[in-house]
Image (cartoon, helix red, strand yellow):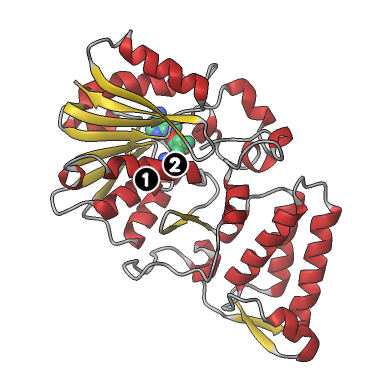
Amino acid sequence: MGFLGEKDMFCCLPICSFRFTCSRSRGQIRFCSSSRPLSITTTSAPLFLRPLSHNTTSSHLQTFHAWAKSLAFSSNHPDPPHLIRELTWLLQDATSDPHTSFLQLGTTHPIWRVPLRVELKELYVLWKARVEERRPLQYIVGCEHWRDLILVVRDGVLIPRPETEMMVDFVKEIDGSESGLWADLGTGSGAIAVAIGKMLGEDGKVFAVDLSQTAVEVAEINVERYGLKDKVEVRHGSWFEPLEDVVGKLTGVVSNPPYIPSKHIPGLQVEVGKHEPQLALDGGEDGLHHLLHLCEGCLSVLKSGGFFGFETNGDEHSELIAGLMKTRWSGQFRDVKVIADFAGIKRFVTGFKM
Ligand SMILES: C[S@@+](CC[C@H](N)C(=O)[O-])C[C@H]1O[C@@H](n2cnc3c(N)ncnc32)[C@H](O)[C@@H]1O
């Protein structure tokens, strides 16, 4: 996850999901064919999975759209055009119409009935929360598009970021990765674990670990959604503690741990700092608290030659960790590399246990 401060929103390259998704073509939302029905209640299900049990007229939706646009432009949000793109996605999720053609029908066929997944008045409430409280759209619609997945997310679980997608590519490149035992530490929504789980062969398995009970619940939902219960085992606990039975046996460990220095948290973009869980963000005084623990701990859980991949806060952290692997843990890791994300920020440290 790369996190932007409020003031950085226009000057940095896109590393936060809110701007990334604007370049992503977000067509009609559908889970892939291998996904399963959700074992969660209708009201906590992602919006697009709820039944079309309400309806309104096209002219009422047109009125909502005009109001929502004017709220976006009259707010003090730093990027109103992006909010308007999100408005379209909200309407796509709330209806069964990927082209939002009801907005044109509002003029030509004003009493045309449009099926809805929530009551129209609820759409007003949701949009006010998006604009006025800066609640992330992903929490409002209950999902995020990530790689080829549509992952359930909710309050208390980090919204997976686009740069983290690269972690799965690192795993894919490892010889024999399909049959290995993997751990995704701090799994959150289960994003990395589910993506790895999909690549595994018969003998492969991923342990998806998180300290947050909410994250564990959401990860389990996503694992079930993609029919991966035999490939991904979600475990509750702190970092390596739930992995005592596989010490020395893992083919690889990947982690996107909390890495924001505590003092930077108040300056984060409002959507992140106010709404995403502190447990997922706060990396302690210098942001390295968890990363250092992971470097040390992976030496015991990995088998000889095992792979590790860690996401960091960027250039300085990656270089520092790579340096420590050659000094503090001299002779214990090999082929340590610092890898840049899409934005050219040195985001990842990868390598192998000797
Ligand atoms: C930055 S989030 C990453 C979530 C997910 N892997 C992703 O990339 O979207 C860090 C995760 O680490 C979890 N976490 C924080 N402290 C932890 C600990 N001591 N043990 C295990 N997980 C922890 C948080 O709950 C959060 O889900």
Q: Which residue is more in the foreground, 228 or 80?
A: 80
Residue visible at 62% across and 42% down? 275
Residue 164 badge: 2
Q: For marks 2 and 1, give the CA distance.
A: 8 Å
Q: Could you say whether the residue bearing mark 2 is in a helix, strand or loop?
A: helix
Residue visible at 73% across and 71% down? 121
Residue visible at 55% across and 62% down? 25
Picture quarter with ligand 1: top left
Q: Residues within 10 Å of mark 1 (few under 14, many from 20)?
A: many
Q: Earlier in the sequence, mark 2 or mark 1?
A: 2
Q: Is residue 49 above or below residue 269?
A: below
Q: Is residue 61 above or below residue 168?
A: below
Check disc 1 and report the residue beneath it. Answer: 192
Residue 157 in sight from this viewpoint? no
Residue visible at 72% across and 60% down? 84
Q: Could you say whether the residue bearing mark 1 is in a helix, strand or loop?
A: helix
Report the amino acid beneath label 1.
Ile
Q: Is residue 246 above or below residue 98?
A: above
Pick out the residue farthest to the right. Answer: 74
Q: Position of residue 262 (x, y in %)?
A: 58, 22
Residue 349 in sight from this viewpoint? yes
Queried on whether the Cβ of the residue with tag 1 lies below 8 angstroms from ligand 1, the answer reads: yes
Instruction: Verify CB contact (< 8 Å) between mark 2 and mark 1.
Output: yes
Q: Position of residue 95 (x, y in %)?
A: 60, 76
